[in-house]
Image (cartoon, rainbow, N blue to C red):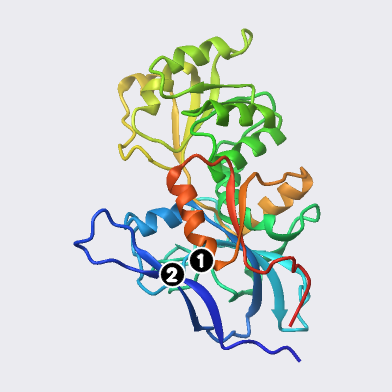
Amino acid sequence: MTTIPSTTKSIVLQTSLPSETPTWHKTSILDVPLRPRTKDEVTVRIISFSLNHRDVWIRKGLYPGILSSSILGSDCTGIIIDPIDHPLHAQQVLIYPALNWLKDPRGPDIKGKPFGILGGTKLSKGLGTFTEYINVLSSHCKPIPSHMIGPSAACIPLAGLTAYRIVLTKAKIKPNMNVLVTGIGGGVATFVLQFCLALGARVWVSSGSEEKMKLAKDLGAQDGVNYKQNDWPSRLVSLLPEDEPLLDVVIDSSGGDILQKCRKLLRDGGQIVSYGSTTGSPISITMSEVLKNLEIKTSTMGSLQEFHEMIDFIEAHQIKPIIFKTLLGFESVEEAFEILKDGKQFGKVVVEISKGSTSLKL
């Protein structure tokens, strides 16, 4: 008989006083009650979790609907330990990192229930993945790709799903398309690069780091430009092939004046797919973009159906997530946050909390 603990060690958000500037909400390692499992749920013992920039924004107070005393985290991998008669019992799985979006490609589709992402907010009702045990809907679990083992799979859910929706649902990348991925280095951008390459596209990248551009080229990118140089658009022009000297798609997370900088680089009817605005400035549209028939699309996260499709895609193409660093134990979470705040990483940061344990232990 499986014995399920009544509490679970977790990284819990402690919101700061409004007078504390700059805002950086503290966290605590606490044993919190494990919510009882419903008949439609499974209990997962978590092996490892990974951080996203979303977690940093929450601690900076820049994310909507922050909930004090909630568990942080959207990404994890773990083993289903209950119920014992579940088809995936004792198997390592990934967990869909969101709520209330089943399959509509346009957006969240459960009437009367708002879309939410796990970790740190009111919409997730305090449920997060930086914890030892979690109860989630059985339908939200899927076995990890067969070519992966252990903690590295924790990198996949949020970043992989976001990238999948950008590349396949929104941009509809095809072989031989010319694609620019801006701000290479983060988890989403590295998955976008890998997915585009798997589909046969030609990919260029931008970064403020020569080292990150080199790493991207090692993965298969054609070349890169340094966005800190004002003439980077003209530099990119010189790198594009003579027979196809224009971009089909720009995949961007910076916002601001990216449209104006890329207008001349894009073919008529080209696309910009935006999944963020790290500059803090909105994308502006002028008649020049209108007359060129440019398409501007936005994208965030993805549906449960896209989540399952994304994992199948990763398996079919034998894609492995890019890991910058793997840390051990709950006590290392602050170090993981400092790495993301510093912004020099290429790939994901993983925290392993069940060292060497990818089999069922009760």
- For this rendering, which residue is in front, 281 or 303? 281
Identify the residue shown where x is 65% and y is 34%.
196
Question: In which quadrant of the rendered image does the C terminus lie?
Answer: bottom right
Above or below — where is 83 with respect to 91? below
* CB within 8 Å, label 2 to label 1: yes
Q: Residue type at mark 2?
A: Lys
Question: At 77% from the left edge and 76% from the top edge, which residue is drawn?
Answer: 360
- Residue at screen point 78% across, 71% down: 359
Q: CA distance from mark 2 to mark 1?
A: 9 Å
Which of these two is toward me, 322 or 256?
A: 322
Instruction: Tell me where residue 258 sits by quadrant.
Output: top left
Residue 347 tag number: none
Q: Residue 353 location in percent, x, y?
A: 63, 67
Q: Quadrant of the N terminus?
A: bottom right
Q: Is residue 344 above or below residue 222?
A: below
- Kindly report which numbered mark, 2 or 1, lies closer to the viewer in this rendering: 1
- In what element is the residue under mark 2? loop
Query: Label 2: which residue?
Result: 113
Towards the viewer: 342 or 167: 342
Judging by the rendered image, the residue that carries numbered circle 1 is 99
- The picture places residue 23, in percent across and down from the top left corner, at 28, 57
Q: Check the image and report above or below for 160 versus 110.
A: above
Q: Quadrant of residue 85?
A: bottom right
Query: Badge 1 local density, few (<14 within 10 Å), some, or many (20+)?
Result: many
* The quarter of the displayed image where residue 75 is located: bottom right
Q: Is residue 282 left or right of residue 158?
A: left
Q: Residue at x 50, y 56 (%)?
A: 335
Q: Amino acid at mark 1?
A: Leu
Q: Secondary structure at mark 1?
A: strand
